[in-house]
Amino acid sequence: MHGPFQAILRSALTSEQAAATLGEFLTSAILGPVSAVAAETDPGGVQFRASLVVTQMLGLAMSRCVLKIGPVAAARPEQLAAAIGPTIDRYLTGDLGVPEGD
């Protein structure tokens, strides 16, 4: 996840155009596909659930590629999947603890 993606992550912090480009990418690459999974669990909360996944993935990408936070940057993909996977799964299919209508 280096090169152009790393550059757009860095730029998104200071450039509205880069932030928009990153937002478009996240929408097409993550939000769309995970919405289908969330729709099966919670049709009324699809956008909220999918957006939670995007925040998790964006935070991971920033921590790993831009900030290079030690153990996270050095972790193997399967380690990250094992650690973060249950959180992503809960976002998509589990109880979020959010009262209905909020």
Image: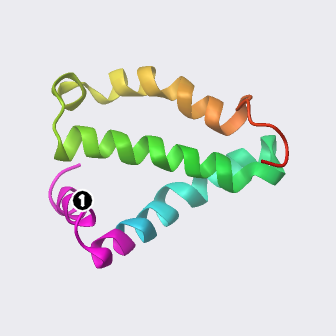
- Spot occupied by residue 19 in the image (x, y as percentages of width and height): 34, 69
Q: In the picture provided, is 101 more to the left or to the right than 38?
A: right
Query: 10 Å neighbourhood of mark 1: few (<14), some, or many (≥20)?
Result: some
Position of residue 101 measured from the top left corner of the image (x, y, whole percent):
84, 49
Labels in figure, total = 1
Q: Could you tell me which residue is drawn at 27 percent across and 65 percent down?
A: 12
Residue pictured at 70% horizontal, 32% vertical: 96
| Residue visible at 31% across and 30% down in the picture | 77
Secondary structure category for the residue under label 1: helix
Q: Is residue 76 above or below residue 14?
A: above
The amino acid type, in three-letter code, at marker 1 is Phe
The residue that label 1 is drawn on is 5
Per the image, is 97 magenta? Answer: no
Of all residues, the one furthest to the bottom in this rendering is 17
Q: Main secondary structure of the magenta part?
A: helix
Q: Is residue 36 above or below residue 69?
A: below
The colour scheme used here is rainbow
Residue 99 x/y as whole percent: 81, 37
Part of the protein shown in magenta = 1-21
Judge from the rendering whether residue 43 lies leftward or rightward of residue 74; answer left or right.
right
- Residue lying at 66% horizontally and 51% vertically, measured from the top left: 48
* 14 is within the stretch colored magenta: yes
Q: Is residue 82 left or right of residue 51?
A: left
